[in-house]
Amino acid sequence: MINIDSISVLHDILGCATPKHPLITLIDYNTINSRESEYNISYKLNLYMISLKNNAECELIYGRKYYDFDGGSLMFAAPGQILAKGDRNSNEKSDGWMLCFHPDLIRGNELWHKMQEYSFFEYEANEALHLSDQENEIVDRIVSHIVVEYSGNLDIYSNDLLISNLEVLLNYAKRFYGRQFITRTAIVKDSVAKFEQLLQEQCTTESIEKIGMPSVKGLARAMGYSPNYLSDMLKKETGKTAQEFIKLQMLEIAKRLLETTEDPIYLIAEKIGFEQPSSFTKFIKMQLGVSPADYRRMKVE
């Protein structure tokens, strides 16, 4: 596996001209001219990437599978994403671009501390943002401003303007994803119902003793989603994240066992997957405001 740690290395691998800025670049897919020897090689991209494709031809492999971008699809990847150059359709040109920037561009800036808010950087490729024509125009306009800024003579304002435009682009992406969740209401509702059923199946003492406490990652994998996409979808539809759903379900099991059995606290903790009784006690106190023993006493009385 080859690490891509800089913009200049990225340009070299893709056969593009020398970059105009050391920390940020926009590459038109039509300008990519990779050497044949670099196809079917895995790369670790240690840059942020925002990729737009306007047709169904896609040479890049994200993760372990191809993804066809249909009619204006925007995809995001955080540093550490594994990609490769596939050899299928190698003679076809793709309409679109990839905007890549090094973490150092925003490091220490306010945007650096806000990046966790843009959870779509951790989505899977098949969870790409599908843009309307109007949204596509907005994205292209913002990106054109970014290109103008890094292509000109740099001055003391350049970095601030680059970062400001990046933040505007990410905020629009957040809005557009919100719209996408809303317009897919029927699919989302079905997914929520499937999630709740799956969670109930995994939140029994028998299941927990066998496979452990349910996790967001495990539930997301079972449903074919990335953890962030699943949580964001649930949050938009129900107001609760996947982790909050799990906590509530675990709390109901704990309450039932405390109310209906005489099992010691350490055994109840063990039954619902807590390795340490102290962790279970802390969990109950945070959720109910009292210790497990006090909660049991209140219910008995």
Image (cartoon, rainbow, N blue to C red):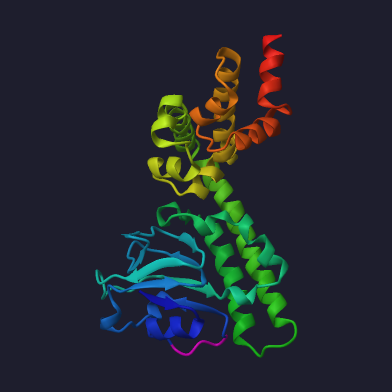
Is residue 145 in view from this perspective?
A: yes
Q: Which residue is drawn at 65% across and 30% down?
A: 284
User: Where on the picture, by quarter, is residue 167?
Assistant: bottom right
143 shown above or below 224: below
User: Where on the picture, by quarter, is residue 114?
Assistant: bottom right
Figure quadrant of the C terminus: top right
Is residue 133 in view from this perspective?
A: no
Q: Nearer the viewer, residue 152 or 258?
A: 258
Whether 158 is among the magenta residues is: no
Q: Report the magenta residues as a range.
A: 17-21
Specify the farthest residue to the top. Answer: 301
Q: Position of residue 87 (x, y in %)?
A: 25, 72
Q: Residue at x 48, y 41 (%)?
A: 215
Q: Nearer the viewer, residue 135 or 36?
A: 36
Q: Residue at x 47, y 67 (%)?
A: 80
Q: State the count of labels.
A: 0
Question: Is residue 12 rendered to the left or right of residue 163?
Answer: left
135 shown above or below 20: above
User: Where on the picture, by quarter, is residue 234?
Assistant: top right
Q: Where is residue 285 in the image (x, y as percent from the top left)?
A: 70, 31
Q: Which residue is drawn at 59% across and 86% down?
A: 151
Q: Where is residue 175 in the image (x, y as percent from the top left)?
A: 61, 52
296 shown above or below 108: above
